Amino acid sequence: MIITFVHHSCFVAETEEKVLIFDYFENGKVKGYHFTGVLPEFDPNKQVYVFASHFHQDHFDPAVLKWADRYAKIHYVLSKDIRLSNRYLEKNGISPSVKEKITFVTHGKQYQIDDMKIRTLRSTDAGVAFLISTEGKCIYHAGDLNLWKWEGAGELVNGKEAREYKREINKLADYEIDAAFVPLDSRQGKYAFEGMLYFMEHVDVKAVFPMHMWQDYSYIAKFKSKVSNGVFARRLIDISGENEAYEL
């Protein structure tokens, strides 16, 4: 399996039979940031699945729906909070017929799409997180499911965030995950590591790819320097920039 970090929270996982694309948006769509990620080349005859965890502009771009004009074997798995009225689609130059290729999902459910088994978790922000089993592989994409504690928010708010996050992550305890994409957001300051640490302590995963870093990759080394468990440090992938590929 080839994993490509495109940018921000967008990853591509390419298996023997299919391509899975997560939370893609075009460069220039998020104000204040200059993302340079591009999708890798892949076999156009492969089945393509496009996932979007929620409606935020750094996780969903309606432009992905235009890919249906290029790829015959494409299917979209979109969080139900992404609203796609016919008027909205036509305004963005997209045929409403694309809805035939979309499965809308909500949290706490299980779905079967072709040979993929998909389980969704409730995000602590918006939308869902995805757990996908296919071709003997298990892949997790958190979306915005993270332990969103903030300095100045107060213990009441931060405590609620911690409880809700841990409740969802504990649902992954019985799975063996090959690749996980998990937020490591430096904007949280002293709380930036807590979600990642809890995830790694409670989930059996071979390779953890940090994401939602807003192009600040320095917190990967900072996290590794703080944890005493060497296994955790080795499992966390050292991402240094956009358009990097890894073979698992």
Image: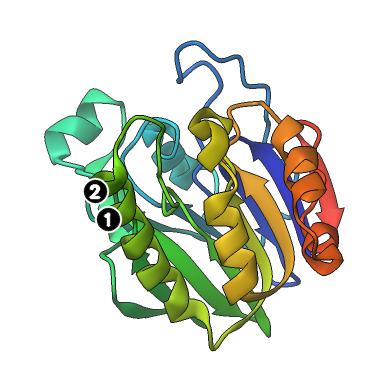
Residue 33 vertical position relative to residue 152 in the rendered view, above or below: above
x, y percent for residue 107: 28, 67
In the image, residue 118 above or below residue 215: below
Label 2 to label 1: alpha-carbon separation: 6 Å
Q: How is the image coloured?
A: rainbow
Q: Nearer the viewer, mark 2 or mark 1?
A: 2
Residue drawn at x 56%, y 21% as measured from the top left:
27
Give residue 70's position: percent from left, percent from top.
54, 43
How far from the left and from the top, in percent, is residue 214?
A: 58, 28
Q: Which mark identifies residue 156?
A: 2
Q: Which mark is residue 64?
A: none
Q: Quadrant location of residue 162? A: bottom left
Residue 21 visible (yes or no): no
Q: Label 2: few (<14), some or many (≥20) within 10 Å?
A: few
Question: Mark 2 is on which residue type?
Answer: Leu
| Residue at image coords 58%, 75% | 202
Disc 2 + disc 1, Cβ < 8 Å: yes
Q: Is 207 drawn above or below residue 205 in the view shown?
A: above
Circle 1 is placed at which residue position? 160
Placement of the C terminus among the 4 image quadrants: bottom right
159, 9: nearer the viewer: 159
- Work out which quarter of the rendered image holds the N terminus and state it: bottom right
Residue 213 in view, yes or no: yes
For the residue labelled by badge 2, is the local secondary structure a helix, a strand or a loop?
Answer: helix
Residue 77 x, y percent position in the rendering: 39, 60
> What residue appears at the point 40 percent right and 43 percent down from the top-left corner?
149
Q: Amino acid at mark 1?
A: Lys
Residue at image location 28% in from the left, 39% down from the top: 95
In the displayed structure, 58 sits above or below 200; it is above
